[in-house]
Amino acid sequence: MSNVVIQLKKNDLSAVKDHYAASIVNKPKNAVFLAKVNGTTITAYASGKVMFQGQNAQMEANKWMEQAATPVAKKKPSVNDHQFSPPGNLFTSSHIGTDEAGTGDYFGPITVSAVFVPEEKIDILKKMGITDSKALTDERIRSLAQELVKAKIPYTLLTMDNAKYNRLQNKGWNQGKMKAMMHHHAIEKITAKIGAEQPVLIDQFCQPAVYMKYIGTERKKLHSDTYFMTKAESHSISVAAASIIARAKFVKEMDVLSARFGITIPKGASAKVDETAAYLIKKNGIEALQDAAKMHFANTDKAMKYVK
């Protein structure tokens, strides 16, 4: 049985407790809560220590590894979160924005896009209807992505198929590191394409310190004038455009998967996804999922129960 222990800041425990609220079974002595979910027992203590025990302990622990990371500020006092908050005038001036799609979906690849919107085209894109892709239908996303290309907005687009995703995951890379490296490469490519460095806004999926740690393990450094912001696509037209281009590519790849297997491959990680995975395993063997799905997701184990 796997056993993973992480140390969180005390004020992060409430988020963990809220996440597992529906799965809390009791409150042991000296513990904040005990929850059982996905074949794993999670015990949290007031000190900030959280223990994960069970067959999917590592997968559940990985959800909180970013918060568990040691803040860079403790090692390098010159670095702090405030320096990574975007200045107020960024949203009305030229900048690069990055966003990704497919990270929470069992089937399909991860796609990351970086888009450069010059100041003089911000209003044009707003009138075009460029906004957060999560607020749009797939059909509208496809249409807007085509309009962005026609408008000659500079962009780069990277796709990590699931064969590579599973290889990296088996090597010990977590999804956070994969996303960080994809964002970093997308920024490098768009900077080379436009021929000049520009301010960069990353739709924040982890703390800046953790992002720098991820790319640092591959001997990469953060670009100058890089900022991080959660829900950045609601404020930055560049990030919103990146979210549309990344999502359009993801939707296209899901259509390709559906055509390949002769059935509609569902998005997300729901019970419908489990049933579809089970169908594909029965029909083609589990090997068929290696280049179609993120194998470490709990959906694989759930699908196998349908098969049995």
Image (tube, rainbow, N blue to C red):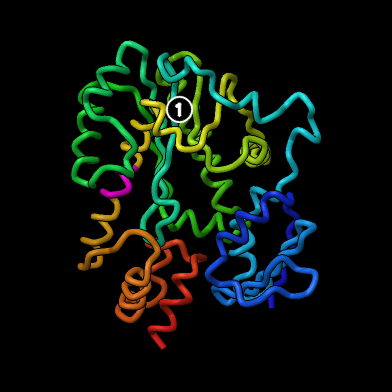
Q: Which quadrant, please, contains the C terminus? A: bottom left
Residue sitting at x 49%, y 69%: 298
Residue sitting at x 59%, y 20%: 224
Amino acid at pointer 1: Lys
294 sits left or right of 171 in the view: left
Give the main secondary structure, helix, strand or loop, of the magenta stretch.
Answer: helix
158 sits left or right of 68 in the view: left
Q: Which quadrant, please, contains the N terminus? A: bottom right
Determine crowd level at label 1: few under 14, some 14-19, many 20+ residues with C-alpha closer than 10 A: some
Residue 152 coordinates in the image, percent (x, y): 26, 21
210 sits left or right of 272 in the view: right
Q: Nearer the viewer, residue 80 or 210?
A: 80
When asked about the image quadrant of residue 239, the answer is top left
Q: Is residue 271 above or below residue 172?
A: below
Residue 265 coordinates in the image, percent (x, y): 28, 63
Residue 307 coordinates in the image, percent (x, y): 38, 84
